[in-house]
Amino acid sequence: MSAHFAIDPLDFVRNTRALYGKIAVAKLVRLQNSLFNNQNELEYTIAGALDRDDRPIIQVTVKGIINLQCQRCLGELEYALNLLACLLVVRNEDELLHLDKDLSVEGILAVPDVNILTLIEDEIILSLPISPRHQENECSTNKPTDDSSTNTKNFFAKLTTLKKLH
């Protein structure tokens, strides 16, 4: 199923609709600057429901692997997405502003044409780490190179060679 269409959030919840499918990471334009490459595909589900207080919500689930750039070694970092976001559907901007005071609840304004692709991309961007990095023992900057494994005698021999050149 393609993610290139829009929904009306209130109608979507009222009819307890659900959409699911796959989307290529390459189609998430705003995400590209955070990626090492855009080769993968993500699975998504968007479902309309009521929460335990009978308020309309949209649940966004995204699963898959994206390849971020490690900020320590600048190499490829495989990042597993397992995202579940519950967005409370509000009818006007006043409700949305009131909702912003509660940091535990995310909201979405009930405008007639909410783009599915944009909604998915927003939630992915919000879930990313600020500075993605490998674990210290996995990062390529910690792997010994051939030069670092040489002994000190070899080091001084190279230093002598440099001294003769200058």
Image: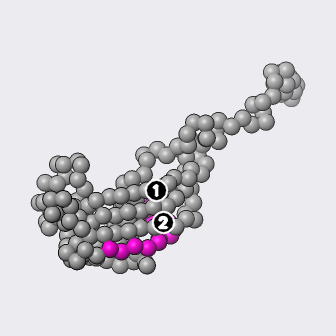
Marks 1 and 2: CB-CB under 8 Å? yes
Left or right of 34 in this view: 6: left
Q: Amino acid at mark 1?
A: Leu
Q: Is residue 79 above or below residue 89?
A: above
Q: Please, is residue 75 above or below residue 158 in the view?
A: below
- First in sequence: mark 1 vs mark 2: 2
Residue lying furthest front in this view?
52
Q: Residues within 10 Å of mark 2 (few under 14, many from 20)?
A: some
Observer-nearest residue: 38 or 58? 58
User: Badge 1: few (under 14), some or many (20 or more) residues near its Cα, within 10 Å?
Assistant: some
Q: Residue 11 at x, y = what percent?
A: 21, 77
Out of 94 and 57, give the one closest to the viewer.
57
Q: Which residue is mark 1?
A: 81
- Residue 76 at x, y percent in the picture: 59, 51
Picture quarter containing residue 17?
Answer: bottom left
Q: Judge from the rendering whether residue 166 lies leftward or rightward of residue 130; answer left or right.
A: right
The answer to whether residue 58 is above or below residue 8 is above
Which portion, as a residue range, is magenta? 18-32
Instruction: Classify mark 2: helix, strand or loop.
Output: strand
Query: Given the image, on which type of amino acid does mark 2 rest?
Result: Leu
139 lies above or below 128: above
The residue lying at 44 percent from left, 73 percent from top is: 21
Q: Residue under label 2, please give it.
A: 42
Compare residues 157 and 25 and report the one nearer the observer: 25
